[in-house]
Image (cartoon, rainbow, N blue to C red):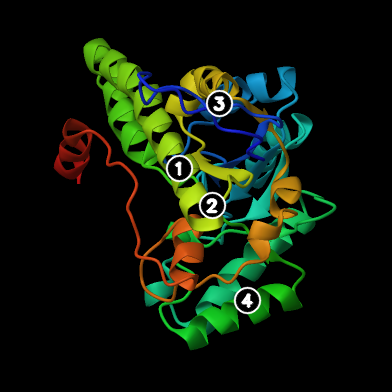
Amino acid sequence: MRLGCVLFVFGLGAGVRPCLLHARQVAITIDDLPFADKASCDFEETRSVTRRLMEPVQAQKVPVAGFVIGERCGNLTEEQRRDLLRVWLDAGAELGNHTWSHPDLNDTPLPKYEEEILRTDAELRGPLGVARVRYFRAPYLHDGATSAVKDWLHAFLAEHGYREAPVTIDDSDWMFASVYGRALDTHDAALARRVREAYIPYMQSVVEFFERRSVEVLGRECPQVLLIHASRLNAEMLPALLQMFRDRGYEFVSLESAMSDSAYRLRDGYVGRKGLSWIHRWGIGKGQAVQLEPDEPRWISDMVKAQR
């Protein structure tokens, strides 16, 4: 997004929005395809959830990049798994690589991690027939606990024609999805409603934070990259989430378009074991201290801990 002007009016609250000459922009990226809620999948349920998730994407022509875990839904036949991913392709989504089994680079030997990437690459390019697989996203956003590992990953990705997919709007949608999935599985309608009612306000608070932090780090708002997951919660709430972005002045762009902005050529200054938003990483590269995004509600995190 390009800040055209900001009106400061004395006496008005913090909710006053900036005056924009150009729309804000966000790329929607969705992880853990074909289904984030369960590693073992019921085909009909997963296909139904996927179709529902893709309905607003297709109807509203929203560019989406989806990141595939190769072994996910491994209890299904190969053809069934491909059918699930074809729902994404038919809706216009671009598919990227999210490794074979979602390992943590912090704790995985590099030869094993190479194998994880290449195995999913072969599945996408081969039997599924995806013409181009351009983007890789590291599980947990862990892309190098040391400079040597980080440099290795970037060199390996470049050798195989990949770019690392960044995230600027990093959030805990997966926690909400975990609690929502439990509510659906136990037929707890009250809990499901509570999760739905809390989800969009939480996501808006995170978006507001990264809008502000982008200005503090870059001097402007850059095109954002949102990370969410292929869950039953997002199948239900994606229309409301898209509307929240529209209400804040956003247009939806492809990951390629967002990454064409000069911000994405800035130095990623973070080396370590955490998964951080690229806005935090750019700030670190400029010598700025990290300011963390808003937490999920305490009752959500408490329920997630209790489920483990």
Alpha carbon distance from label 4 to label 3: 32 Å
Quadrant of the drawing holding the N terminus: top right
Bin the neighbour count of mark 4 within 10 Å (Cα to Cα): few under 14, some 14-19, many 20 and up. Answer: some
Task: Identify the residue at image location x=69%, y=64%.
Answer: 163
Residue, far right: 131
**Image coords of residue 98 (percent x, y):** 57, 57
Q: Which mark is residue 154?
A: 4
Of mark 1 and mark 3, the one earlier in the sequence is 1
Pick whichever, 118 or 133, lies toward us: 133
**Image coords of residue 44 (percent x, y):** 55, 24
Which residue, given by chain and number where applicable, does mark 3 sit on? Answer: 245
| Left or right side of 37 for 6 | right
Which residue, given by chain and number where applicable, does mark 2 sit on? Answer: 167
Q: Amino acid at mark 2?
A: Val
Taking the image as drawn, is residue 141 in sight?
yes
Numbered disc 1: secondary structure? helix
